[in-house]
Image: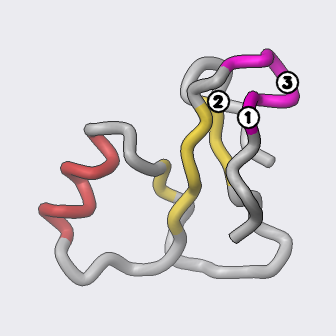
Amino acid sequence: MPRKPSACPECGSKKVIPIEYGYPADMGAYLKAVDEGRFAPGGCCVDESNPDWHCRDCEHRW
């Protein structure tokens, strides 16, 4: 994964989190991490063109 950006390119927010892809082994821990804002869910289909980052303020993904 590329280095974490310092801010969202769309709105400038510093609330940037990684997007995680794949099927979780422990759904409870996964949902807790999403609720805590540690990462954003990206779905189970992994592709090289999928975005890596999510802005918690404007929902922009890149």
The part of the image, by quadrant, that contains residue 6 is top right
Residue 39: x and y, percent? Answer: 45, 50
Q: Amino acid at mark 1?
A: Ser
Which circle's residue, 1 or 2, is located before the other in the chain? 1
Magenta highlight on residue 12: yes
Q: Is residue 25 left or right of residue 10?
A: left
Marks 3, 1: nearer the viewer: 1
Q: Residues within 10 Å of mark 3 (few under 14, many from 20)?
A: few
Q: Residues within 10 Å of mark 2 (few under 14, many from 20)?
A: some
Residue sitting nearer the eye, 30 or 43 = 30
Q: Amino acid at mark 3?
A: Glu
Which circle's residue, 3 or 2, is located before the other in the chain? 3
Rounded to the nearest whole Å, what is the CA distance between mark 1 and mark 2?
A: 16 Å
Q: Residue at x 19, y 68 (%)?
A: 27
Q: Amino acid at mark 2?
A: Glu
Residue 25: x and y, percent? Answer: 24, 83
State the extent of the magenta-drawn residues as a range. 6-13
Q: Which residue is mark 1?
A: 6
Marks 3, 2: nearer the viewer: 3
Residue 27 higher or lower than 38, as above or below: below
Q: Which residue is mark 3?
A: 10
Residue 16: x and y, percent? Answer: 61, 36
Image quarter of the N terminus: bottom right
The part of the image, by quadrant, that contains residue 55 is top right
Q: Residue at x 73, y 58 (%)?
A: 3
Magenta highlight on residue 44: no
Q: Which residue is mark 2?
A: 59
Marks 1, 2: nearer the viewer: 1
Question: Going by the picture, which residue comes out furthest to the left?
Answer: 28
Residue 42: x and y, percent? Answer: 55, 60
Q: Residue at x 64, y 42 (%)?
A: 54
Q: Main secondary structure of the magenta part?
A: loop
